[in-house]
Image (cartoon, grey):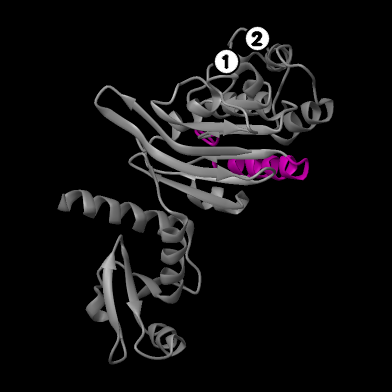
Amino acid sequence: MIRAERLSRAFGNLQAVKAAGFHVPEGSVTGFVGPNGAGKTTVLRMICGLLRPTSGRVLVNGLDPVREPLEVRRRLSYLPGETSIYLHMRGREFLEFLASFRDGRDGELERRLPRLFELPLERKVRTYSAGMKQKLALCGVLSAPVPLLLLDEPTRGLDATMRAQFNDAVELLRERGRTIFVSSHHLADIEKVCDRMIFLLEGEVVPTGRVEALRRDLASLVRVRLREGFSPGDLPLPPGTAWESRGGWVRIRAGGDPRELVASLAHGPVEALLWGRAELEEIYRHLYLEKSEKGGEG
């Protein structure tokens, strides 16, 4: 559905996106992960045709947003990172206003999404909380009868309950075959709904092979977070065990059977323990630290 080929964008001397290459399969839910300033919003705007690449290109269902902007926009619905909603309208009026610009409508989604998000559509938007305004914008974007949804920080301003509602909406759209490309800082939430991830750091896409190698390496380690006031020297580690402290966690590589190591740690000052699976937040944190350390060396 989306294919980026050496996609780059500069703003004066600032190289916001650097020869990014990636693809988003049709029907997938793909997460787009990176810190503030990584270039995620710039990429999304180039996909929409709102920004022209400095070099390279991006294709949407085989179409170039630069040469065929209207055809591309007929195929997608975009939620920007900063949303604006007409405060004088009622919720239902705002959704009708958005729907009036489309070639067609999906009546079932238009009914189900406001119920899912528990929106009071008869109230004036000016009476909505920040979270309710974000949910109203989501309803307008997600109900569009288009194959591609681009969501820039869709859970901004939403509490844990509201983010769970968003995840339910994503599952509903996945069942309908939509392709969803979503950026978010709520990594634990995004990991629950995404089929795959693209990591963007300082405008560069992290190679898939590097991500998978890090995932395997982290999964093979025992990672522990210590109770307050304790240090790694307080752990009952077997001989031959190597460890390092990074990002608030102690990473331990067993010299022998890791199950014996896990059993021994049960008697130590351990607050949390991870083994056998790498969480998205941990992968992201290590990629970010690696990038920062390389930048410092330069």
| Vertical comparison of 21 with 289: above or below | above
The x and y percentages for residue 40 are 44, 35
Query: What residue is shown with label 1?
Result: 85
Q: Quadrant of the N terminus?
A: top right
Question: Could you tell me which secondary element the residue under label 2 belongs to?
Answer: loop
Which of these two is toward me, 19 or 127?
19
| Number of on-image labels | 2
| Magenta stretch: includes residue 158 | yes
Q: Residue at x 72, y 20 (%)?
A: 121
| Magenta stretch: includes residue 229 | no
The answer to the question of whether label 2 and label 1 lie on touching residues, with beta carbons closer than 8 A, is yes
Q: Is residue 280 left or right of residue 64?
A: left
Residue range corresponding to the magenta coloring: 154-177
Q: Residue at x 59, y 21 (%)?
A: 128
Name the disc covering residue 201, or none: none
Query: What residue is shown with label 2?
Result: 89
Please tell me in which quadrant of the rendered image residue 20 appears.
top left
The local crowd at label 1, few if under 14, some if 14 to 19, many if 20 or more residues have their Cα within 10 Å, is: some
